[in-house]
């Protein structure tokens, strides 16, 4: 989906605007500085068009950190969004931080909209005239809190937003998109460099395809792959506080543009909460997943014993993901990465014909009927695969299925069809 990013100083009302656009109270509005919102990207819809809204402001710095944090927001937005909404507080006017960010934003050839927030009343509108001086064109007055002006703003933004959904409209035969993600220093850039061989074969734009300048196309064993957001892999966030937040932000935005995420994990250190969080970001994104255990050259027998237990404990929920044990340094087993990617993408693309899927369901239900609940037994009437990427199934039932039973269906789907490397989604529609 096309990506719209929201950028701005703390307290200008970014999350209120997010809430208004997605029509939910999901993004927390907090006046306390230092709050980390844990979600950064939201599915949004306006007049039947779908897009991803990225709230870059989840980490609210103290006064000293404001410039760095807003610059980091701008950087992520410029690299990974298709359009940027730059929000200022109309009651405060343009600050020096705003001017600083505008200088950054003007370097990018993507539409940037100047949003003057907190214009709750038409009588305040004349106040925003000063904002012309920022050089971002006409300031658009809105009240995120009351909804004033937001519809006009969305009309404007969506009018110029490209239709291309990075995934659904993948160019036929075009290279598949891979995001290499993971904590800092796990070896992402080493892997990227090594994956293409010592002589990096950077393939130029293929006729008829579009490519973001922060992506890189690389030929491996005769096939071209597109690694998304390689700029983010190379560039480090030079911040003391908030670096984790911006790393997650960057990861989510990169995954949005990818079809498969390779999570790189450093085996020389214990698997950390942040590693698990990054795996979960891939799951949330619905992309295919490959686990790359890197720095295998540093592994001794003792560490290896612990590693296998950590994997069972912390990554047991993604035991279906193909796993490669590699060393980006020595090149060990790097040739296994491509088959793992291919396997994961094949699962992600899989479609099961409705007839076959219902034969599978009939057999499963006959062998293991849903347990009786209050004298009643919900029945599965019929099922179908609603979509692929990732495979998403809908079951029509006569009652709510226990979560345990739904997990059982998922497990059985994996037993029969594999789906290695792809999340699978099972939804229900209850018919009275
Ligand atoms: P990134 O931050 O994830 O991109 O990590 P880098 O690719 O910059 O690697 C971080 C450090 O780990 C560098 O000093 C690399 O040389 C080192 N490194 C990367 N891969 C390996 C590996 O497989 N084995 C060893 N021993 N070191 C590695």
Image (cartoon, rainbow, N blue to C red):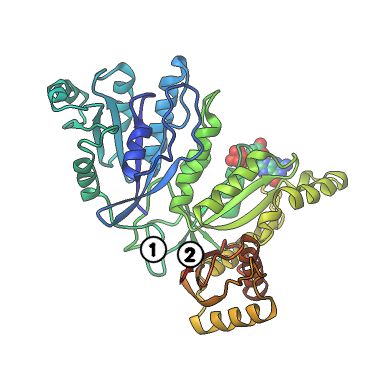
Placement of 148 over or under 417, stated as above or below: above
Find out whether the residues at labels 2 and 1 contact each other: C-beta distance under 8 Å.
yes
Placement of 157 over or under 312, stated as above or below: above
Query: Earlier along the polypeptide chain: callout 2 or callout 1?
Result: 1
**Can the viewer see residue 193 in this picture?**
no
On the rendering, which quadrant does ligand 1 occupy? top right
Q: Which residue is mark 1?
A: 168
Residue found at x 50% / y 27%:
35
**Can the viewer see residue 334 in this picture?**
yes
Within-10-Å neighbours for mark 1: few <14, some 14–19, many 20+: few
Residue found at x 28% / y 42%:
110
Give the image location of residue 86, x and y in percent.
Answer: 30, 32
Depth check: give the residue in front, 317 or 189: 317
Give the image location of residue 299, x and y in percent.
Answer: 80, 45
The Cα atoms of the two marked residues, 2 and 1, are separated by 9 Å
Placement of 303 over or under 405, stated as above or below: above
Determine the image quadrant of residue 415.
bottom right
Residue found at x 66% / y 71%:
412
CB at disc 2 and ligand 1 closer than 8 Å? no
Tell me if 192 is positioned left or right of 110 in this view.
right
Q: Which residue is mark 2?
A: 389
Give the image location of residue 159, x and y in percent.
Answer: 21, 50
Residue found at x 72% / y 42%:
271
Give the image location of residue 428, x and y in percent.
Answer: 50, 66
């Amino acid at each position: 989906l096309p990506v719209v990013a929201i950028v701005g100083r703390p307290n200008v009302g970014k999350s209120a605007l997010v809430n208004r656009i997605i029509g939910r109270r999901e993004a927390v509005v907090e006046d306390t500085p230092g709050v980390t919102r844990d979600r950064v990207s939201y599915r949004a819809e306006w007049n039947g068009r779908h897009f991803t809204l990225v709230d870059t402001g989840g980490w609210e710095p103290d006064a000293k950190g404001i410039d760095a944090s807003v610059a980091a927001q701008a950087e992520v937005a410029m690299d990974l969004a298709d359009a940027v909404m730059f929000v200022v507080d109309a009651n405060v006017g343009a600050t020096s931080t705003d001017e600083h960010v505008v200088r950054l934003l003007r370097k990018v050839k993507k539409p940037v909209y100047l949003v003057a927030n907190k214009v709750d009343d038409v009588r305040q509108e004349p106040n925003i005239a000063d904002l012309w001086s920022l050089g971002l064109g006409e300031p658009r007055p809105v009240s995120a809190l009351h909804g004033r002006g937001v519809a006009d703003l969305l009309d404007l933004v969506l009018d110029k937003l490209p239709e291309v959904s990075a995934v659904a409209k993948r160019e036929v035969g075009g290279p598949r998109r891979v995001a290499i993600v993971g904590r800092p220093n796990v070896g992402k850039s080493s892997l990227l460099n090594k994956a293409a061989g010592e002589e990096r074969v950077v393939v130029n734009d293929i006729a008829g395809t579009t490519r973001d300048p922060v992506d890189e196309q690389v030929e491996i064993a005769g096939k071209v792959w597109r690694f998304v957001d390689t700029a983010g892999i190379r560039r480090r966030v030079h911040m003391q506080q908030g670096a984790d937040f911006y790393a997650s932000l960057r990861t989510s935005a990169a995954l949005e543009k990818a079809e498969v995420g390779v999570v790189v994990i450093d085996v020389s250190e214990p698997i950390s909460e942040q590693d698990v969080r990054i795996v979960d970001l891939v799951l949330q994104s619905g992309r295919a997943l490959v686990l790359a255990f890197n720095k295998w050259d540093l592994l001794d027998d003792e560490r290896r014993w612990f590693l296998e237990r950590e994997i069972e404990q912390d990554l047991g929920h993604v035991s279906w993901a193909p796993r490669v044990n590699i060393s980006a340094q020595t090149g060990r087993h790097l040739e296994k990465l491509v088959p793992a990617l291919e396997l994961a993408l094949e699962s992600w693309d899989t479609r099961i014909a409705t007839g076959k899927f219902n034969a599978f369901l009939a057999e499963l239900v006959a062998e293991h009927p849903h347990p009786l609940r209050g004298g009643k037994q919900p029945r599965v009437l019929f099922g179908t695969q609603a979509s692929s990427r990732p495979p998403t199934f809908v079951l029509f039932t006569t009652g709510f299925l226990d979560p345990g039973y739904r997990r059982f269906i998922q497990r059985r789907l994996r037993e029969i069809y594999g789906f290695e490397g792809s999340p699978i989604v099972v939804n229900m529609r209850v018919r009275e």
